Amino acid sequence: MHPIQCKCGALRGQLESNGAHNRLICYCTDCRAFARFLGKTTDVLDGQGGTEIIQVAQPRLHFIQGEDCLSAVRLSANGMIRWYTTCCGTPIGNTMGNPKASFIGLIHTCLDRSQMDKDFGTHIAVLNTDTALGKSKPKQRGLLGVLARFIWILITNLIGRRYRKSPLFNTSGLPRVDPQILSPEELAKFKLAV
């Protein structure tokens, strides 16, 4: 089991270590906007605005305490649900709004850095490099592998109906908390921030 916790320790959980996963750094503007929304750019983003993420099936995530600290935001009405804690603003991860698309992209700030190589390997894909900050962009790598494992995660959880065991959606298929939806003006502010 890989430990999950927010910075202050109010939210704690475990992630089953076995199973398909992706380890990647995403340089998209939405990931940066989320870090800016939380005021956590220095904790979340690397020097070129990338966020390290571990993608796994949602049923592998188990909360032990502090589930009442979970909150969520959507950058737009149909955007991903981006989960974080209200206690200390730690970003937890990103999910689709459809509970049948049962994956979560866990953000490195809620994971144990000392165990990441052991639990998730040292191969890190690099994606969305065209929107990385700076003049010299990182080279994109690993996209096909990420897509193949992502599809595998989705299909196996859909066929086995494991998606119903998500800790983030209730039995009616709704997020366990109502996500805040940013206005276009709010989103523009977070996307344009330096």
Image (spheres, rainbow, N blue to C red):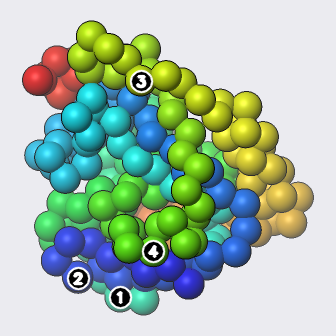
Q: Residue at left 73%, top 68%?
A: 19
Q: Which residue is mark 1?
A: 65
Give the left or right position of residue 23, taking residue 106 as reference: right
Q: Residue at x 32, y 14 (%)?
A: 136
Q: Secondary structure at mark 2?
A: loop
Amino acid carrying label 4: it is Gln
Tell me which label, 1 or 2, sits earlier in the chain.
2
The circle drawn on residue 138 is 3
Instruction: Name the foreground residue: 86 vs 41.
Output: 41
Quickly name the residue at label 4: 115
Disc 3/disc 4 C-alpha distance (Å): 25 Å
Sequence-earlier tag: 3 or 1: 1
Give the residue type that dot 3 points to: Pro
Badge 3 element: loop
Is any part of residue 178 visible from this angle?
A: no
Look at label 2 and name its amino acid. Ala
Question: Mark 2 = which residue?
Answer: 10
Q: Secondary structure at mark 4?
A: helix
Of the residues under marks 2 and 4, which one precedes in the sequence? 2
Picture quarter containing residue 151?
Answer: top right
Q: Are marks 1 and 2 in contact (CB under 8 Å)?
A: yes
> Which residue is painted at 62% across and 76% down in the image?
17
Residue furthest out toward the right:
159
Image location (x, y in percent) of residue 144: 73, 31
Judge from the rendering whether residue 186 lies leftward or rightward of residue 78; answer left or right. Answer: left
Q: Is residue 194 left or right of residue 121?
A: left
Q: Earlier in the sequence, mark 4 or mark 1?
A: 1
Label 4 crowding class (10 Å Cα cut-off): few <14, some 14-19, many 20+?
Answer: few
